[in-house]
Amino acid sequence: MHIHHAKYIFFCSDNDLENYALYANVIKRIKPRRPITCYANCSSNTVVGYMEELLSEERKGEELLKKIDTVHFNQKDLTVRMLLAEPAVKHSILKSLEGISEDSHTVDSIENSIKPSMYCFFP
C-alpha cells in the first residue's frame, strides 16, 4: 500500500518531538490522493503549534495537502474518541446517562448531601 492512499496515519511515539519529526517528514513528502486524517500523540501545546504551522506553510506550496486533517491527542482522548465513534457504544453510554441531570451531580450538591443537616455541640 502506498502512503498516498492511506485513510489514517498515526504518530504514536511517547516523545512529542519524535512525532513532530516523523510528521514533518511525511508532510513534506506526501501527495495525498484522498482525504487523510493524521493522529499525532502530542501533549505539548508548543509542539502542536509547530505541527500546525508546518502544515500551513507546506500547503502554500502543495495544494494536495489541503486533503490532510491533523488531530492532536493524548492516549485517553483518542481512546474515548474512537469508542464514541462506534454507534453501538455511543448509544449504550448515552442510555446509561439518561435521567442524570446536569445539576444533580455538581460538586456543591454532592458536598451538601454529605454534610450533616444538624450540628450538635457538646460542652
Image: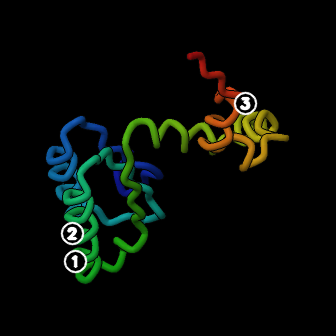
Q: Earlier in the sequence, mark 1 or mark 3?
A: 1
In the picture shown, does residue 118 fall above or below 8? above
The amino acid pointed to by label 2 is Leu
* Residue bearing the label numbered 1: 57
In the picture shown, does residue 46 fall above or below 115? below
* Quadrant where the image shows the N terminus: top left
For mark 2, give the secondary structure: helix
Q: Earlier in the sequence, mark 3 or mark 2?
A: 2
User: Whole-percent x and y of residue 100?
Assistant: 78, 41
User: Whole-percent x and y of residue 33?
Assistant: 43, 65
Query: Measuring 78% from the left and 46% from the top, which residue is drawn there?
Result: 101
Query: Measuring 33% from the left and 49% from the top, which residue is drawn there?
Result: 40
Query: Measuring 76% from the left and 38% from the top, which residue is drawn there?
Result: 97
**Whole-Å distance between the Cαs marked 1 and 3?**
62 Å
The label shown at residue 93 is: none
Please name whichever residue, 41 or 100, is drawn nearer the observer in this view of the structure: 100
* Residue bearing the label numbered 2: 54
User: Whole-percent x and y of residue 92?
Assistant: 77, 34
Image depth: mark 3 or mark 2 in front: 3
* Colour scheme: rainbow
The reply, left or right, for residue 42 in relation to residue 91 is left
User: Whole-percent x and y of residue 56?
Assistant: 27, 75
* Other-residue count near label 1 (Cα within 10 Å), few / some / many at <14 / 14–19 / ≥20: few
Q: Are discs 1 and 2 less than 8 Å apart at CB?
A: yes
The reply, left or right, for residue 81 in relation to residue 63 is right
Q: Are discs 1 and 3 less than 8 Å apart at CB?
A: no
* Other-residue count near label 2 (Cα within 10 Å), few / some / many at <14 / 14–19 / ≥20: some
For mark 3, give the secondary structure: loop
The amino acid pointed to by label 1 is Glu
